[in-house]
Image (tube, grey):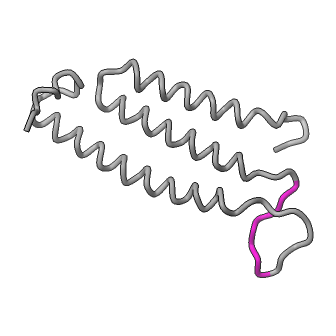
Amino acid sequence: MTQGTPFNVPFLAVAALIGIAFYIILSQRNLIKLVMGLSILASGVNLFLITLGYREGGVAPIYTHAPAGVMVLPVPQALTLTSIVIAVACLALMLSMVIHIYRHTGSTDSEKSRIMKG
């Protein structure tokens, strides 16, 4: 972050992303838009994890030649990488299910997908 940027800006961005995602998830009936909302929600969570690990003036957590000073926390970065991999796998699964629903019903409307019972 720069000196003129308040510390709460990343947290406000996280709140905005999660708020937008919840609005999309709750208000849309199109399955592709629902998947997009879940993807935005995952991005908000990833930004939150990275924001938690930030330290002012911190350096990268590479321990081969540890520099003097404060390092950023490596655990949120590892959790974020894991979360990205899981989110991509879930996104691929959700999109394949949407394609299957579209082929079966001819629509991406979530109300029409209710006819797919058993």
Residue 109 occupies quadrant: top left
**Is residue 63 magenta-colored?**
yes
Q: Residue furthest bottom?
A: 64
Residue 38 occupies quadrant: top left
Q: Residue at x 61, y 27 (%)?
A: 16
Give residue 112's position: percent from left, percent from top: 16, 23
**Is residue 105 magenta-colored?**
no
Give residue 65's position: percent from left, percent from top: 82, 80
Q: Residue at x 70, y 30 (%)?
A: 12
Q: Is residue 12 left or right of residue 95?
A: right
| Magenta stretch prevailing secondary structure | loop
Q: Is residue 100 left or right of residue 68?
A: left
Quarter holding the N terminus is top right
Image height check: is 32 above or below 57?
above
Q: How many marks?
A: 0
Q: Which residues are magenta?
A: 57-64
Give residue 70's position: percent from left, percent from top: 87, 62
Quarter holding the C terminus is top left
Q: Residue at x 78, y 59 (%)?
A: 72
